[in-house]
Image (tube, helix red, strand yellow):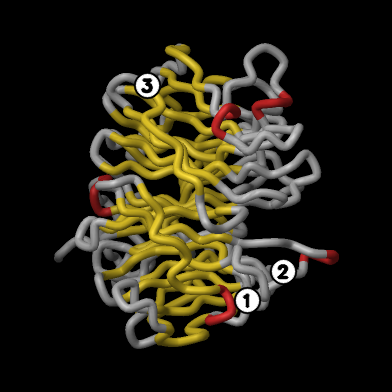
Amino acid sequence: MKPWPIVFVLLFAACGSGSVIEQVGGGGGDDEGDDGISLNLSPSEKIYVAAAFFTDPVGSIATVGMNNPYPVESRLAVTDGSDVVVRSFNNQLFVINRGITSTIQVIDPDSLEILGNYSVEPESNPHDLVVANGRAFISRYDANLADDNTDDLWVVNPTSGSFITGINLKPYTTNDGERLARADQMTLVGDFLYVLLQDLSRAFAATTNGKVAVIDTRTNAVVTSIALAGRNPTSIVYHAGLNRLFITDTGLFGPGFSVDLTTDYGGIEVINPDTNETLGILMDDQNFSGYLFGIQIVSETLGVVSVNADHVATFNPSTFALINANIYETPSGVIPELLVDRNGRLWIPERDPANDGMVVIDPAAGSILGGPFPVGALPASLTLIRP
């Protein structure tokens, strides 16, 4: 029988420190699901997803088959904190423990063995990790709170965490008296790393436009800084076919977390990586009737974006026309991340406690293919395994 590609899900559950537990969803043996379908798949056939209860300090990894009938296998594994993001490089899983914990765990995707565990300094609040040219680049959102080193980007050995160098990105922020880079999400284009700088105040107010720092990963040097047209950039992705970087600018938050859509600061902004120049906000947040958060590009004519963090819209990334204003809406109020798999299907972590799990959508048709598939906790972060 042809093996089913699967999704890996990192969950939070109560289990002792250092323990590894295997639990096939709904029962069954260690290697098969309820219907006898083999779950013995290679890392290249898997997606990794992080999920969390903020009141629970530990996590677990589950697998969900990417094809119908979407068999679920869960293996519980301990993480250092409850606020986590998961990434994958070099056939390894990297768990980013954010907030006060501020550690990185490196996990073997097959055995779930912890290969490395290191600190990037308590309270520095790492938000993203990218591996390039044998080094891990880690954005530290609250680097100003660290005791010893306040550099916004750390460069370390990916597995051991041995410190190589730090990169101070504060000089590339607006000189407004505070100069906090708020280094956040990152993406790689060739050897160049594009790092979102939200440049928010201590009160997290978007008082100035965001920036993108461009790092040469071969030399660890800042090549340039791109001043954005928008404010509070929250997500960045690169599409090779279009040779463009797409950024969601969330814009200005007002009282009660409301967003002023009448400003020119929110929407989808585009960068040409050949010139490292912004083409501006090519699709305003008013087109979506809400602020934008996460973004993924499915093809040259189809993109998905989360709106008001509670529903998903589709658009054309070549013409910047709205396709469908709402293909999925969560009752939980929060869609933390989006992921498009190699088959062009959209995976959404559904965090509604009454019906939580992974949801699979055909973004072109705007139809739900399956789910939610319960995985033991509230899923939050997803990544494809990367060689």
| Residue depicted at x 79% and y 64% | 254
Instruction: Give the alpha-carbon distance from disc 2 to disc 1, as whole Å.
Output: 8 Å
- The spot of residue 385 in percent (x, y) is 31, 46
Report the residue that reaches farthest toward the front.
175
Front residue (pair 347, 306): 306
Front residue (pair 224, 154): 224
* As drawn, 125 above or below 297: above
* As drawn, 35 above or below 137: below
Label 3 or label 1, whichever comes before in sequence order: 3
In the figure, residue 88 lies in which quadrant? top left
| Residue depicted at x 38% and y 44% | 187
- The spot of residue 147 in percent (x, y) is 72, 15
Q: Quadrant of the C terminus?
A: top left
The dot on residue 220 is 3
Crowding at label 2, few (<14), some or many (≥20) Cα neighbours within 10 Å? some
Crowding at label 1, few (<14), some or many (≥20) Cα neighbours within 10 Å? many
Q: Amino acid at mark 3?
A: Asn
The dot on residue 290 is 1
Front residue (pair 333, 316): 316
The dot on residue 259 is 2
In the figure, residue 100 lies in which quadrant? top right
Q: Quadrant of the N terminus?
A: bottom left
Q: Is residue 18 visible?
A: no
